[in-house]
């Protein structure tokens, strides 16, 4: 098959969608398919083409204030280019309803005969007051465009429920995977709690820091907090942590191998945002066996996995801390969770999303 992926950005940019698209695209190539990724790129003024690990990558100039929105430039040229690009394609797979680039591309290809798959990564709303206001209008636009899609795919049961609630579409759920060799990585806990991802206020890293402080004061664990990532809240977070009297560090994103090494030595990995779709970092921590703390409602996607604590961020800190301490003590006695590999996930895409029903 000839498969085209549309994404707001692509590798080497770091992010959940970027990583998912790269993981699937490269495995599709290894399976003998022809794959093109067309993605937004804020650092260029004109189209750029390259090949990465067998994947044809087309980068289109975008305007992405605060690494958000991903508004395409030269939209008339993009319409002409994309219309021609999909003429001999079997499937166009569009990623992320939160990105204008992706939805504009869907607006273009909906009038063609190509099979269209949409993965929304839908959270139900925006992450700021301004974005929540915009979402009241953007949601109706998405609802109209989804009527032209052949298959809606979500990465979690919770996301599928949100899509059904807000857009009246049934979705096929295929969860994200992990690298094939990550299941062989051994958990060797040291003295730190870890977070890796975008540094935004809604990620609730201040609560993770409060848990670290409480574990140290109530249970004498002497833990530190290690944060890896970038985002608009980084400076503010540093000031908050400085006042909390805990040992911490905030670093940029790491190469994947270094990230996995750091993750495998964390005593806990925490992601306490209440607005996610299916964070890859939790999948990877689960596969290694690192105990994780996740927040409702999206954290319920991981219900039933071992070494996993699902909390309500509105609970009293003392209750949360007690449960986290119990998690740390119990984790070594439990098996790691069984997480699918990207090869298994890619086969699911081919059989359930890309293949037309006979």
Image (cartoon, rainbow, N blue to C red):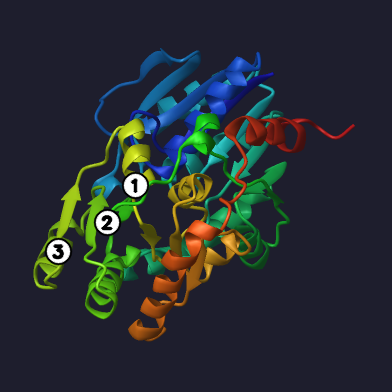
User: Gap in Å between the C-alphas at discs 2 and 1?
Assistant: 8 Å
Give the residue drawn at x 56%, y 58%: 334
Crowdedness of circle 3 by 10 Å Cα count: few (<14), some, many (20+)? few
* Callout 1: SS: loop
Q: Which residue sits at x=57%, y=40%?
A: 177
Label 1 vs 3, first from the N-terminus: 3
Q: Residues within 10 Å of mark 1 (few under 14, many from 20)?
A: many
Is residue 353 in view from this perspective?
A: yes
Distance from disc 1 to disc 3, alpha carbons, whole Å, reads 27 Å
Q: Is residue 336 left or right of residue 250?
A: right
Residue 170, label in figure: none
Residue highlighted by disc 1: 265
Q: Which residue is mark 3?
A: 236
Residue depth check, mark 2 versus mark 3: number of the one nearer the observer: 2
Determine contact: label 2, label 1, CB under 8 Å.
Answer: yes
Residue 91, above or below 148: above
């Amino acid at each position: 098959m000839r498969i085209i992926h549309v994404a707001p950005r692509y590798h080497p940019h770091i992010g959940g969608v970027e990583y998912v698209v790269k993981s699937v695209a490269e495995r599709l190539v290894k399976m003998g398919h022809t794959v093109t990724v067309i993605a937004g790129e804020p650092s260029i003024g004109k189209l750029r083409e390259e090949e990465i690990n067998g994947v044809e990558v087309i980068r289109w100039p975008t305007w992405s204030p605060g690494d958000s929105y991903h508004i395409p430039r030269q939209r008339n040229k993009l319409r002409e280019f994309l219309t021609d690009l999909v003429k001999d394609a079997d499937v166009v797979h569009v990623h992320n309803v939160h990105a204008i680039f992706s939805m504009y591309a869907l607006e273009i290809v909906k009038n063609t005969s190509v099979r269209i798959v949409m993965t929304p990564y839908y959270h139900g709303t925006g992450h700021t007051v301004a974005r929540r206001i915009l979402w009241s209008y953007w949601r109706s636009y998405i609802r109209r465009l989804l009527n032209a899609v052949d298959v809606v795919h979500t990465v979690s049961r919770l996301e599928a429920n949100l899509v059904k609630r807000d857009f009246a579409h049934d979705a096929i759920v295929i969860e994200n995977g992990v690298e094939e060799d990550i299941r062989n990585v051994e958990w060797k806990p040291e003295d730190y709690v870890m977070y890796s991802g975008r540094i935004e206020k809604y990620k609730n890293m201040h609560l993770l820091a409060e848990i670290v402080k409480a574990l140290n004061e109530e249970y004498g664990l002497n833990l530190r907090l290690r944060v890896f990532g970038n985002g608009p809240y980084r400076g503010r977070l540093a000031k908050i942590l400085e006042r909390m009297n805990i040992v911490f560090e905030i670093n940029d994103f790491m190469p994947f191998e270094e990230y996995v090494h750091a993750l495998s030595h964390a005593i806990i990995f925490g992601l306490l945002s209440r607005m996610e779709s299916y964070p890859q970092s939790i999948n990877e921590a689960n596969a290694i066996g690192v105990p994780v703390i996740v927040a409702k409602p999206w954290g319920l996607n991981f219900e039933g996995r071992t070494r996993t604590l699902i909390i309500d961020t509105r609970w009293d800190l003392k209750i949360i801390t007690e449960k986290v301490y119990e998690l740390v003590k119990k984790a070594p006695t439990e098996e790691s969770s069984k997480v699918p590999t990207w090869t298994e996930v890619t086969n699911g895409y081919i059989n359930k999303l890309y293949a037309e029903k006979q």
